[in-house]
Amino acid sequence: MSTRARIHWIRALSGGFLAEACLIAVVVPIFKIFGQHALLYVVPPAALVTCFLFALWVGRGLTSRFILHGVLVGVVATLLYVALTLARPEPFAYLVAHGLKILGGMGGGFVAGRRRGPEAATE
């Protein structure tokens, strides 16, 4: 396996962990101020944005497989949340948020690749 095709697991795991930690840091004060109902509206877009930003951060040090690394950021963030809640049933908005985490990560990886150059984003 060439170094070009290597998956940077530590970067992907770190990005997913930090994305979920930042999401929790944003959501807790909103919960305290506005209550549980507000989270149904805040969590999905916040999940998209945090995973996008951390996938972009992960992609800064890469030379290829930007989108894959972004997806891994979203998957790690999702799995962390599921583990923290012991896989309890969730509102539909949270299930949507999990999908948005993956899409946000994918988007962040895509943008990181485009910043490297058009030929790098397609690898």
Image (tube, rainbow, N blue to C red):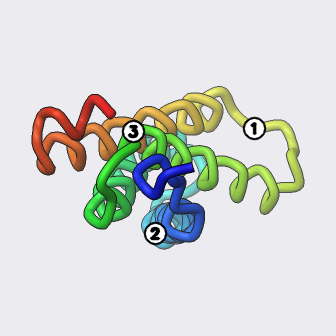
Which numbered mark, 1 or 3, is in the foreground of this view?
Answer: 3
Earlier sequence position, callout 1 versus callout 3:
3
Q: Position of residue 87 (x, y in %)?
A: 86, 46
Q: What amino acid does circle 1 point to? A: Glu
Of 93 and 117, nearer the camera is: 117
Looking at the rendering, in which quadrant would you find the C terminus?
top left
Kind of element beneath mark 3? helix
Whether residues under marks 1 and 3 lie with C-beta atoms below 8 angstroms apart, the answer is no
Q: Position of residue 108 (x, y in %)?
A: 31, 45
User: Which residue appears at 69% of the width and 33% of the height?
Assistant: 91
Q: Position of residue 78 (x, y in %)?
A: 64, 47
Kind of element beneath mark 1? loop
User: Which residue appears at 75% of the width and 37% of the height?
Assistant: 90
Q: CA distance from mark 1 to mark 3?
A: 28 Å
Which numbered mark, 2 or 3, is in the foreground of this view?
Answer: 3
Which numbered mark, 1 or 2, is in the foreground of this view?
Answer: 2
Whether residue 31 is visible, yes or no, is: no
Q: Which residue is mark 2?
A: 22
Q: Which residue is mark 3?
A: 67
Please indicate whether residue 118 sits to the left or right of residue 111 in the image.
left
Q: What amino acid does circle 3 point to? A: Ile
Q: Which residue is mark 1?
A: 90
Rendered image quadrant of residue 113 = top left
Whether residues under marks 1 and 2 lie with C-beta atoms below 8 angstroms apart, the answer is no
User: Which residue appears at 40% of the width and 43% of the height?
Assistant: 65
Please indicate whether residue 60 sits to the left or right of residue 4 in the image.
left
Earlier sequence position, callout 2 versus callout 3:
2
Bin the neighbour count of mark 2 within 10 Å (Cα to Cα): few under 14, some 14-19, many 20 and up. some
Of 22 and 41, nearer the camera is: 22
Rendered image quadrant of residue 55 = bottom left
Q: CA distance from mark 2 to mark 3?
A: 21 Å
